[in-house]
Amino acid sequence: MVNFFQKNGGKIVLERGKPTEINNVIWVDLLDPSEKEKKMVEEMFEVELFTTEESEEIETSSKYIETPNEIGINLNFIISSDDVYLNEPISFILRGKRLITQREVKLKAFDDVYKKLRSAKVQDGDDIFLLILDTRIDFDADLIENVTDKISAISKEIHKDRELEKDILLKITSLQETTIVIRENIIEKQRILSTMLKSKNFPSEDYETMRIMLKDVGSLLDHTSFNFERLEFLQNTFLGLIDMEQNRIIKIFTIVTVIFMPPTLIASMYGMNFKFMPEIGKTWGYPFAVLLMIASSIITLWFFRRKKWI
């Protein structure tokens, strides 16, 4: 599908299919386009669209390509699926104050930009690109806030639950991976904005907007760093509590073993097959041995308590 946005007086009008006035088109949005639609756009606006391989390229040199007449930008927008965050490549082409975007999936950031165009004062494709980027940064802030809420929930769970489950550790690990994905995505935007500030193809009046966006991105990076530190702290706390619980169990086993050692020794002595053992021939021999074993356990337990080992 291809959506054409053209400037009609003071309004931005959406058209599907072939636009009536090509010169008035300031934004072409290709959503999961067919090869026929791609060829139509290339011929209509004399551009060469990015291939799928070029859009997914991870090298920095492929993220921002600038010529005297055109700027090509490849960015990743984060999408969530079953609490799994993935990068979705989006391509932007700025040529002659016209913006061309390529994407394979529907994105809420683009839907919001569609709505904002009704009231936003945009003059050309440069303004729309900055509007998309600014909207996406707001969505990244919401993602970070969502991760922060989940971290706070895990923190409360660790403090309240005495029976620690491995699911908590898996949640912490999952949030660490999510934070890394978000941070890498934001760093990518920071790099693109820094490069755009050096470009002469953007009008000077847009520089202040880009600087503000760059500051917003910087604050988001600080927040992701804080979240990552909190996750590391929670992970260390969780592992520390697990170690304490294991030490407590080992301590209990050790105490029980030591308490039963004297009775075992006494029982072993009276189990020896010697001819001369005076207690064997006495009527009080068996009760004496039992009382001796009980007394040895009680004395050992009393000694442990006196030393405050239990």
Image: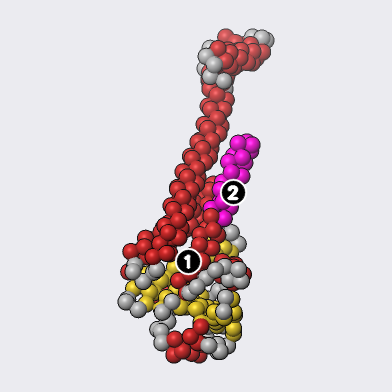
Marker disc for residue 150 = 2
Q: Categorize mark 1 by other alpha carbons within 10 Å: few (<14), some (14-19), many (20+).
A: some
Q: Furthest residue to the front?
A: 9
Which of the two marks, 2 or 1, is nearer to us in this view?
A: 1
Magenta range: 142-167
Image x and y of residue 77, in percent = 50, 65
Relative placement, left or right, of 14 versus 218 is: right
Residue in view at x 54 percent, y 81 percent:
6
Image x and y of residue 153, in percent = 61, 44
Q: Where on the picture, by quarter, is residue 292? A: top right
Task: Tell which circle, 2 or 1, labels the residue nearer the N-terminal end.
Answer: 1
Vertical side of 45 occupied by 163: above or below: above
Q: Amino acid at mark 2?
A: Lys
Out of 91 and 170, give the one closest to the viewer. 91
Main structural element of the magenta stretch: helix, strand or loop? helix
Out of 308 and 23, give the one closest to the viewer. 23
Marker disc for residue 40 = none
Image x and y of residue 246, in percent = 53, 35
Which colouring convention does the figure follow?
secondary structure
Relative placement, left or right, of 203 versus 164 is: left
Residue in view at x 50 percent, y 73 percent:
123
Q: Please identify the quadrant where the C terminus is shown.
A: top right
Q: CA distance from mark 2 to mark 1?
A: 30 Å
Helix, strand or loop at mark 2: helix
Q: Categorize mark 2 by other alpha carbons within 10 Å: few (<14), some (14-19), many (20+).
A: some
Relative placement, left or right, of 255 versus 65 is: right
Q: Amino acid at mark 1?
A: Leu
Residue in view at x 51 percent, y 75 percent:
103
Marker disc for residue 130 = 1
Helix, strand or loop at mark 1: helix
Q: Please identify the quadrant where the N terminus is shown.
A: bottom right
